[in-house]
Image (cartoon, rainbow, N blue to C red):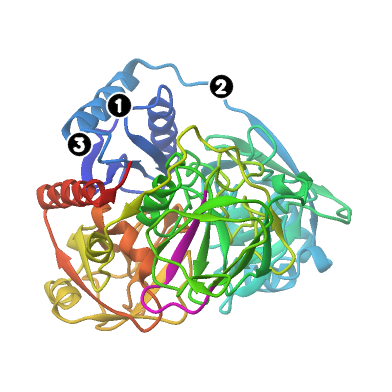
Amino acid sequence: MDHEPGLRHVSDHSLLVSLAEEVSHAAHRRVVAAFRALQEPALPGVRDLHPAYSSLLVSYDPRRADRDGLCEAVAERLRALRDAVPPAVRTVEIPVAYGGADGPDLTDVARASGLAESEVAAVHASGDYFVCFLGFSPGFPYLGGMPPALAVPRRATPRTRVPAGSVAIAGTQAGIYPLASPGGWQLIGRTPVRLFDPLRTPPALLAIGDRVRFVPISATVTGDRGGARRAAAAEPRRGPIRIVDGGLQSTVQDPGRPGHAHIGVSACGAADPLALAVGNWLVGNPEDAPAVEMTLLGGTLVFEAEATIAVTGSDFSPRLDGAALPLWTGVEVAAGQTLALGPTRGGARCTVCVRGGIGGARVLGSASTHVTSGLGGLDGRALRRGDVLPAGEPAASPGRGRTFDPAVASRLQERNRIRVTAGAQWDLFTSAARSALFAAPYRVSEDSSRMGLRLAGAALSARRQGEMITEGVSLGALQVPGDGQPIISFVEHQTTGGYPQIACVIAADLHRLGQLRPRDEVRFTRVSLAEADAALRAADGAATAGRIGE
């Protein structure tokens, strides 16, 4: 490797490997080489690799990875690249129908570039493209190598829905939308090729380092051109749990699907992983058993067979056949009984765990529902009236007589104070902005979602604008867009991003993010990596001490 990589920890659970200081083909080659070197064999504790234009983010579990040891292991792998032989490059042809309904922005691009529409299509198809990385959404390729003649800005107003298969350009970049999603790039064509299919191996058609050649065709075919097929769709709709009321947003969740950030799929998973882990212990499940997560308004479930259940997280006033049900306690339920949960009385979410977990198919190794892209869970969506959830196979341990100390739970779920470490672009912000982040509380916006928690408060300004090269994004990163209002990257966050990251929530407090609800006020406190490690040990110790019973 002809450039000495820079390694620095940008949170207590992520390491940034800087491989260049510019966007170039040479930088791309370094990123590809580094990604392949770190991918196999996997390093202990590493959860995800996030390749970008000139850097690679390594997300890891601080419980399983020694920070200094990981840093040295990464450096050793990168040193070995000096003698590595580059692998052969694969070329993938993508058929494209340009213009018309398939490319509604082709006319505008032609006008801006001074070319005829047919010339835009011809120039675009003549490009020598390479996949810099996948991000934004599952399977979305950021393509380098676009002819400079087509360098036009993105749309002033993004579309709320871009059709799957849309071929797009923005600035010097080209890309393809694998799934229907919002987007602000210029749409010049569309491909019938499915770029992302969770049931395919590998699920993403393109991979970092691939070459891409666009081939013009007369028209695309009708039908589904890129929507993720639902692994759960073939599952029988028979089982012991019937949904009478799905509430605002109730979904099937487990700890998530790490290991797929390089194809644009975030780990996702339970918004409050502590509530999930404790709830599963209460009913005798493994910690990774899927459960039902409810948001703000609760819902109603009928158990068509006897079960052992536990409700953890925020207090949604759970009632079993009208009688109050204790939180943080394993409870026996008879066949035909109804569990009703009302609006939250505290945080944002509660978790309903059932002995045996929620059954059903796994998508990329997880039952977790990724609402943004429609993966996992029940058809990739929130639960609704009439849905039936199958129960999984119970574990050997019955989990009877277990409870969790409510006082410990209350302390662990305190959500109005969140600890952070300095983020990847901490030095990019003014001293006034750094002070402002900690000086006064921020309010959680109504526009928040599982993708990001939007905050309102003191605007944070960077010392330099427009110099941020897209990098990997950690769970819990505080990104700062142009308006200066921070956004906390939440469980369905984009795997890469172009906004500077001023700070990152520590691993010990990530579960608290799942209990933040609109209009909550939250204060941030900066801690060191050593303090973050101590906080994680303390949280884990409390979670163990709070367990009462067999």
Secondary structure of the residue carrying tag 1 is: helix
Three-letter code for the amino acid on which mark 3 is drawn: Arg
Q: Which mark is residue 282?
A: none
User: Residue 20: x percent and y percent?
Assistant: 31, 42
Upstream in sequence: badge 1 or badge 2: 1
Is 462 left, or right, of 529 in this rendering? right
Label 1 vs label 3, nearer the camera? 3
* Residue in the picture at 49% in, 41% down: 262
Residue 327 to residue 394: above or below: below
- For image coordinates 22% across by 81% down, the residue present is 441
Q: Which residue is mark 3?
A: 67
Given residues 207 and 382, the one toward you in this image is: 382
The mark that comes first in sequence, 2 or 3, is 3
Please tell me whether residue 350 belongs to the stretch shown in magenta: yes
Give left or right: position of 62 versus 454.
Answer: left
Q: Secondary structure at mark 3?
A: helix
* Quadrant of the drawing holding the C terminus: top left
Q: Camera-side residue: 333 or 176?
A: 333
The answer to whether the residue labelled 1 contacts the one labelled 2, judged by CB atoms less than 8 Å apart, is no
**Image position of 109 (left or right of 456):** right
The crowd level at tag 3 (other Cα within 10 Å; few <14, some 14-19, many 20+) is many
Evaluate whether residue 229 shows in this view.
Answer: no
Residue type at mark 2 is Ala
Instruction: Tell me, yes or no, if residue 522 can be seen here.
Output: yes
Q: Position of residue 114 (x, y in %)?
A: 67, 69
The residue tagged 2 is 88
Is disc 2 placed on a helix, strand or loop? loop
Q: Give the residues in magenta.
A: 341-354
Residue tagged 1: 78
